[in-house]
Image (cartoon, coloured by chain):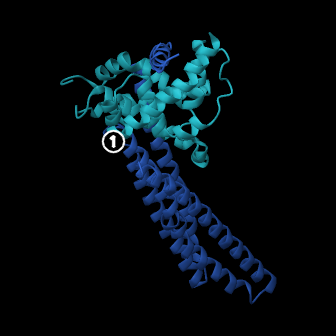
Chain colours: A blue, B cyan
Amino acid sequence: MLSDDICNVWQAQGSGPAPLTLEELRKRGDRFHSQIARRNLREYLVMALLIPYFGYFAWTSPLPLMRVGNGLMIAGLLYMTYQLHRRAAAADAPAEMAWNTCLAFHRAELERQRDALNSVWKWYLGPLVPGMATILAAGCIAAFPRSTVAGILVLVCGGAAAVGLWWMGRLNRRAAAGIQRQIDALDAL
Amino acid sequence: MEGKSQDDRYLEAAAEYGAALHRLASAYEADADKRRDLLQDVHLALWRSLASFDGRCSLRTWVYRVAHNAATSYVIRQKRSRASAWSSLDEVAAVADPAEGERAADQRHSVDRLLAWIQQLKPLDRQVMLSYLEGLDAAATAEITGISPGNVATKIHRIKNLLAQRFHQGGRNAE
């Protein structure tokens, strides 16, 4: 079989009708927007629950440092929500698929993933760290005078959280380096 | 294309390239259920994109770019942690074909073997391979993929050699 023949065999493969009617496409398009709206609503609802929670302690805690920590948590959550919203809005542009060549689109997709992994500390985990660290410090200050065991327990929990965050950051950096190698391979073409 | 609605453009594109989109989906996804979902995603992306069609390129280039980019986005999501499992044309050519000589004249079997190779290829090699199989010339393939025409010609040369090695040999054995 010659290569031209295999092209003919390939093109002779049967095909069914279009998988979706216009009505179904419209419904799916609407559903796509509904999913985005639902996801945004979910984020806002989580914030609507967490912000009063931290706000309550920021207002009522007898420890000034605890009040500061809870205030920092609120600021961090607001910043995180803004970044999530901004990045999600930038990702939805269907005509980009046609305006970009496959090479440019593939590179842009990989860049987006690499940057998301590299910057996750800046916009997703990082904004919560000052608040968490301050609350932890306030917890230690409050616990040690009453019970050494409770104070040590707070420190151990904080240390475990710090190690977990560091490990997540390390995994993200390694994944980002792997994606960068794919981008370099595309650039070499 | 002046004055046509998004729906009219989509119907025109689906009528002319529907079969090619069907084949394209089969080259990106082996599982039948997932392939059906991918094909629907490709059609949805095409319909949505055509709201912004401005004639800056031909409808054919537009359709193939949207389809390949939607499918590539899908395989990147599916294989995010296993991108190293993809192979280049050279790597695929270097691996012996276990089915060589067995029922190679059978067209369905030929297509199945071809699909098994294509599904291993890196996205850009896969796009060039599919463009060649769909009968697009090097200039059209270069416009769709963004690879230089010279590079496309080199890849097509390798594809032809690969197809000749695998299918011509198998065909002779089966005769």
Residue pictured at 54% horizontal, 76% vertical = A130
- Is B95 or B41 nearer to us in this picture? B95
In this orientation, which residue lies closer to the viewer: A175 or A116? A175
What is the x, y in percent for residue B124? 45, 39
Residue at 61% in and 49% down: B81
Residue drawn at 63 percent across, 68 percent down: A165
Residue A66 against residue B23 in the figure, above or below: below
Q: Secondary structure at mark 1?
A: loop
**How many other residues sit within 10 Å of disc 1, few (<14), some (14-19) or many (≥20)?**
some
Residue of label 1: B148
Query: In what quadrant of the picture does the N terminus of chain B appear?
Result: top left
Q: Nearer the viewer, residue B132 or B48?
A: B132
Left or right of residue B47: residue A49: right
Task: Give the letter of the chain under mark 1.
Answer: B
* Amino acid under disc 1: Ser
| Residue that lies at the very extreme toward the bottom in this rendered image | A145
Indicate the position of residue B92 as horizontal and vertical percent values.
Answer: 58, 36
